[in-house]
Amino acid sequence: MGDMIRVVDYISGHIYESKKLAGESLNIPVRIINKSLHTNTEVIYNNRKYKFGYNFNKKCSSFRSSKFPFGKYKGQSIKECTDKDYIIWLIKQAFTDIGLRTSLKERLKELNNG
C-alpha cells in the first residue's frame, strides 16, 4: 500500500494525496498521521486536533471546502466572502490544499462574473 494512498483529516474534511503531502501541508510529522491512522483516534500536535483515515475513493481528488478552515475568515462561508484580494492571496499560497483552492477559484469566478 505505501504512502501513496489518499488520507483524509476528518476534523477539517480535507483530503490529501498521501501521508507525506498531508504532513507537508499541515506541517506535522508523518509519524503523527500514522499514529492517528493506526489507532483510529484523534491526535494533538501543536495544540491542534487531527483524526486521519484512509480515502480509497479514486473519484474524490478534489474535495471542495464550503467554509474557510483558518485565517481571517475562519469558519465563514466561502460563498459569502466578497474579499477578492484575500481569495486571490489564499489561492496562491503553497499551504492551500486542492479542495480549498478549487472552492476559492469557483468563488472568484462568481465574483468576477457578477
Image (tube, rainbow, N blue to C red):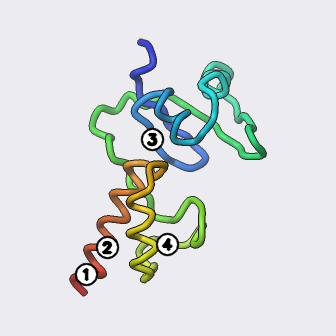
Q: Which mark is residue 112?
A: 1
Residue occupying image coordinates x 29% and y 67%: 106
Q: Which of the 4 quarters of the picture holds residue 35? A: top right
Marks 1 and 4, the one that precedes in the sequence: 4
Given this view, does label 4 or label 2 mark the residue nearer the observer? 2
- Residue 20 appears left or right of 26: left
The residue located at (38%, 28%) in the rendering is 56
Question: Can you name the residue that lies furthest to the top here?
Answer: 1
Task: Indicate which disc residue 15 carries.
Answer: 3
- For disc 4, the neighbor class at 10 Å (few under 14, some 14 to 19, many from 20) is few
Q: What residue would you read off at disc 4?
A: 77
State the mark number for residue 73: none
Q: For residue 108, which numbered disc appears in the image?
A: 2
User: Marks 4 and 3: CB-CB under 8 Å?
Assistant: no
| Picture layout, residue 37 above or below residue 76 | above
Of the residues shown, which amino acid type is indicated by label 1?
Answer: Asn
N-terminal of the pair, mark 2 or mark 3, is 3
Residue 70 placement (x, y as % from top left): 59, 61
Secondary structure beneath label 4: loop
| Amino acid of disc 2 | Leu
